[in-house]
Amino acid sequence: MAYDSSNVFAKILRGEIPCVKVFEDDKTLAFMDVMPQAEGHVLVIPKEAAESVLELSPAGAAAMMATTQKIARAVKKSLDAPGIMLAMLNGAPAGQSVFHVHFHIIPRSAGVDMGLHARGMVDPRSLEPVAAKIRAAL
């Protein structure tokens, strides 16, 4: 499938849709997931147009992984998370719902259930206090 530049993440990158930013550099963007599976759920996307990791350039993949690692450390530290789950879904059969390659960074604690993927949207304003904690840990 060809990359669809009308996907929600492409619109976020162009500034057409707002997001709660955690981090941005010239190659990547990290922002709070408005359908979080746990408090502190962050998405990391490359600025390169690629539907899945299979289409992403090696340089884009390296940049996305470096940002993912940086943000995962900040999420773990700022939320005192014992564990961090990294997830990447590639293709609809794998559960991908936005066709711009992305990592999910989800803090995990034993005994705390995780919400279902892409099931319920929260008020983006409620995400800012958590995003501020994560940014402070960078």
Image (cartoon, rainbow, N blue to C red):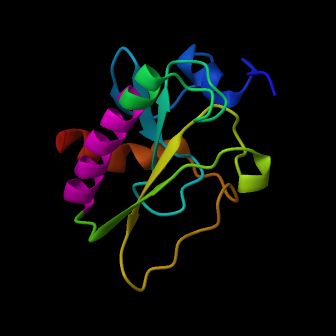
Give the magenta range: 63-79
Front residue of 86/33: it is 86
Q: Specify whether residue 29 is painted magenta.
A: no
Spot occupied by residue 39 in the image (x, y as percentages of width and height): 43, 60
Front residue of 107/79: it is 107
Front residue of 82/88: it is 88
Check the image and report above or below for 87 versus 51.
Answer: below
**What secondary structure predominates along the stretch shown in magenta?**
helix
Spot occupied by residue 31 in the image (x, y as percentages of width and height): 44, 37
State which quarter of the image contains the C terminus. top left
Q: Where is residue 16, by image quadrant? A: top right
Left or right: 131 in relation to 49: left
Spot occupied by residue 62 in the image (x, y as percentages of width and height): 37, 29
Check the image and report above or below for 100 versus 80.
Answer: above
Front residue of 28/123: it is 28
Spot occupied by residue 109 in the image (x, y as percentages of width and height): 36, 76
Check the image and report above or below for 76 versus 90.
Answer: below
- Residue found at x 39% / y 55%: 40
In the rendered image, the residue lying farthest to the bottom is 111
Number of marks = 0
Check the image and report above or below for 46 versus 98.
Answer: above
State which quarter of the image contains the N terminus. top right
- Residue found at x 79% / y 22%: 2
Left or right: 37 in relation to 42: right
Q: Where is residue 76, by image quadrant? A: bottom left
